[in-house]
Image: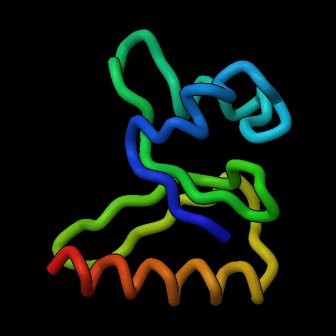
Amino acid sequence: MRLLPTWDATLLVHARRTGVLPEEHRTRIFSSRVPHSFPTFLIDGVVAGTWSVEDGRFVASPFRTLASADRRELEEEGARLAAFVA
């Protein structure tokens, strides 16, 4: 699992490559209405959702139901990020 920020080079380089960003999710990350990408998280090297830090807490918005181990790892990493940002 890896957290990627807005404008991350991995997504910019791979914006049209389905190996990192499946085509079905591309419009959730890149849109002509919003001039920037959104922070995303990868599971097994593939974009699996978006994230943010709101009111000092990490908020994940997965694109599908996550396995419990993946969810736990995401929440742990997100908590570390939220603590760092605070």
Closer to us: 55 or 86: 86
Q: Quadrant of residue 22?
A: top right
Q: Is residue 27 found left or right of 21 in the rendered image?
A: left
Closer to us: 70 or 81: 81
**What is the number of callouts on the image?**
0
Q: Quadrant of residue 81?
A: bottom left
Identify the residue at image location x=60%, y=66%. 2
**Residue 34: x %, y % from top left:** 35, 21
Image quarter (top left, top right, bottom left or bottom right) of the N terminus: bottom right
Asked if residue 52 is positioned above or below residue 36 in the image, the reply reads: below
Q: How is the image coloured?
A: rainbow
**Residue 27: x %, y % from top left:** 60, 24
Image quarter (top left, top right, bottom left or bottom right) of the C terminus: bottom left
Q: Is residue 42 found left or right of 29 in the rendered image?
A: right
**Residue 62: x %, y % from top left:** 62, 59
Asked if residue 51 is positioned above or below residue 85 in the image, the reply reads: above
Identify the residue at image location x=50%, y=82%. 77
**Residue 41: x %, y % from top left:** 58, 58
Asked if residue 33 is positioned above or below residue 62 in the image, the reply reads: above
Identify the residue at image location x=52%, y=62%. 3
Q: Is residue 70 found left or right of 74 in the rendered image?
A: right
